[in-house]
Image (tube, rainbow, N blue to C red):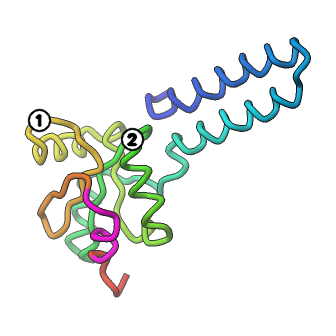
């Protein structure tokens, strides 16, 4: 299991334990509602919310060809989630690199952020931008994409 799944699995497990306790105390309705909340939190913090990640080298190659930005992200990052949600369908047009799966991607982020793995880091035309406004990123998506 990779660390991108640790938080979602912990959320489901914790929710299951608390819901089980509520069921045994005679509150099955509350247990179901609470378990649903934990499952929703787990799904939002899972890598499934993001478009399929590729390696940093492949993302850089593709970006050089089509001019689309590269987004370096990691699961569990609320700013990455904010960017993903606010981009909506436009998110599919970007190249996404999970820095927890790709050491080269993590190195790019550290180089851009004084040694820190601060995400989201969006690289547009070779220039890194740390935690940019989602509207700004949307404007950078090439219209031909």
Q: Magenta span has 137?
A: yes
Residue nearest the observer in this picture, 68 or 60: 68
Of circles 1 and 2, the one toward us is 2
**Magenta-colored segment: predominant secondary structure:** helix
Answer left or right for 27 relative to 61: right
Q: Label 2: how many residues lie within 10 Å, few (<14), some (14-19) or many (20+)?
A: few
Asked if 66 appears above or below 40 in the picture, the reply is: below
Answer left or right for 25 relative to 123: right
Answer left or right for 112 relative to 27: left
The residue at which mark 2 appears reads as 77
Count of residue discs: 2
| Residue 134 drawn at (x, y percent) | 34, 64
What is the span of residues highlighted in magenta in the rendered image? 132-139
Between discs 1 and 2, the one toward the N terminus: 2
Q: Label 1: how many residues lie within 10 Å, few (<14), some (14-19) or many (20+)?
A: few
Q: Which mark is residue 67?
A: none
- What kind of element bears circle 2? loop
The answer for how far apart the CA atoms under marks 1 and 2 are is 18 Å
| Residue 109 drawn at (x, y percent) | 19, 45
The residue at which mark 1 appears reads as 115
Residue at 87%, 12% in the rendered image: 25
- When asked about the image quadrant of residue 44, the answer is top right
């Amino acid at each position: 299991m990779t660390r991108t799944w640790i938080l979602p699995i912990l959320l489901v497990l914790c929710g299951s334990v608390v819901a089980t306790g509520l069921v045994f105390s005679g509150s099955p309705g509350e247990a179901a509602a609470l378990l649903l909340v934990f499952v929703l939190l787990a799904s939002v913090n899972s890598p499934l919310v993001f478009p399929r990640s590729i390696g940093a080298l492949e993302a850089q190659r593709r970006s050089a060809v089509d001019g689309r930005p590269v987004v370096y992200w990691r699961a569990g990052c609320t700013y990455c989630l904010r960017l993903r949600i606010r981009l909506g369908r436009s998110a599919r047009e970007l190249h996404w690199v999970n820095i927890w799966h790709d050491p080269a991607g993590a190195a790019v982020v550290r180089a851009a952020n004084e040694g820190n793995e601060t995400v989201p880091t969006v690289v547009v035309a070779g220039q890194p931008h740390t935690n940019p406004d989602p509207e700004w990123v949307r404007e950078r998506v090439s219209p031909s994409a």
